[in-house]
Amino acid sequence: MQKRSALVLAITCFTGFASIVPATSRAQLSSNVQTYASGLNGPRGLKFDPDGQLYVAEAGTGGTTSTKGQCAQVIPPIGPYTGGMTSRISKITREGKRETVASGFPSSVDSNTPSDISGVGDLAFLDGRLYAVLSGAGCSHGSSVPNAIVRVDNETGKWKVIADLSSFLKAHQAKYENAADFEPDGIFYSLVAHRDRLYTVEPNHGQVFSITPEGKIREEIDISEAEGHIVPTAIAERNGDFFVGNLGLFPITPNSSKILTLTRNWFHDPAPGLDPSPELQKLKVAGSRAGFTTIVGVDFGPDGLLYVLEFSPEAGYPTPGTGKVVRLKRDGEIEEVATGLTVPTAMTFGPDGHLYVSNLGAAAPGAGEIVRISIY
């Protein structure tokens, strides 16, 4: 039997799982977890702006527009998708109230599970400006808008495509392509800012791309070339290196996911005005740490430790209420920080030192929430 990537990739293999997580589903959260905001439509990536306001990407409610027969489609039972313009970006006030920042982004739903929805995947701030990566767009998702990096005016709500990731992905195929999980437009998952670029991960193809504010795209690494179809999802940056966690495949094998350390092929910045060769610009896998399960989030805490969000670490298929946050201690031990999460999808640290997590991120619209976790 063909294994399927858990998320097909990024969210798609929540198929059959999101439907068993009703809006009323509640798990016993550990005592250091508190609900911060609720009533969200598929909360995914979340980031704080320079002023300490929390922004969250919401996948939306999908739609009914079909492009079947117009372009390559995802094969059944996942595809074909239908789409609509129902995804949005919200701001969560310090009192936990949701406010719409921008809306009308592409949102797609698969043909098998009505609550399996992709939309805006993640957010990042670069030089004070808000950017988002689209995951539920492109012709194969029933949309005329490509999967892309968009620049968002958080005052007016207007947004603009600055980099067409769908087209770039098709022109830069990964070394390892899994036909059973193939997504023509990709399903981009994470977005981070570093120096003058944005970095995003595409799990289905196993690639990391960088994008300038002017829209220039570069493939940073094809992880599939060295690691095969491991489904990289989450990315964090630390001192110029990148740390990428992978989800893995269904059925879930505990402790089989890992954190890859990606670094440049050069050790020092080039002299002013001199750019390294294209090969030296690329990232490479410099190391890894195994022992994790179904990674969907990575970030460094105020204590300097690496924190990892695990989607569902039990063996077999995803189990509601088993999601958790762990951290990698300085002695190499993996320690539990928070438990009882249900289909969590992303996390970020706030200026207050607390960890904020998108919980019930792959559940039915309206069920999503943001929880705040004390790490001490």
Image (cartoon, rainbow, N blue to C red):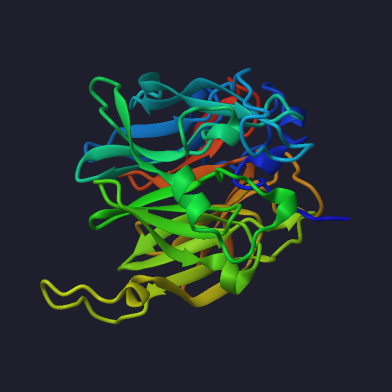
Which residue corresponds to the image point at 44% horizontal and 45% vertical from the top-left? 165
**In the visual, does 318 lie left or right of 138?**
right
Residue 212 lies, in percent from the top left, at: 27, 51
Q: Is residue 317 above or below residue 155?
A: below
Residue 69 in view here? yes
Residue 16 lies, in percent from the top left, at: 78, 35
Quadrant including the N terminus:
bottom right
Which residue corresponds to the image point at 69% horizontal and 21% vertical from the top-left? 24
Q: Is residue 183 above or below residue 146?
A: below
Residue 374 in view here? no
Residue 358 lies, in percent from the top left, at: 52, 37
Task: Give the total number of marks visible in the rendering.
Answer: 0
Q: Residue furthest front?
A: 70
> 70 or 14: nearer the eye?
70
Q: Is residue 289 above or below residue 324?
A: below
> Hey, which quadrant is residue 153 in on the image?
top left
Which residue corresponds to the image point at 46% horizontal and 45% vertical from the top-left? 167
Q: Residue furthest bottom?
A: 267
**In the visual, does 259 lie left or right of 354?**
right
> Hey, which quadrant is residue 103 in on the image?
top left
> 99 or 105: nearer the eye?
105
Q: Is residue 65 above or below residue 163?
A: above
> 82 or 90: nearer the eye?
82
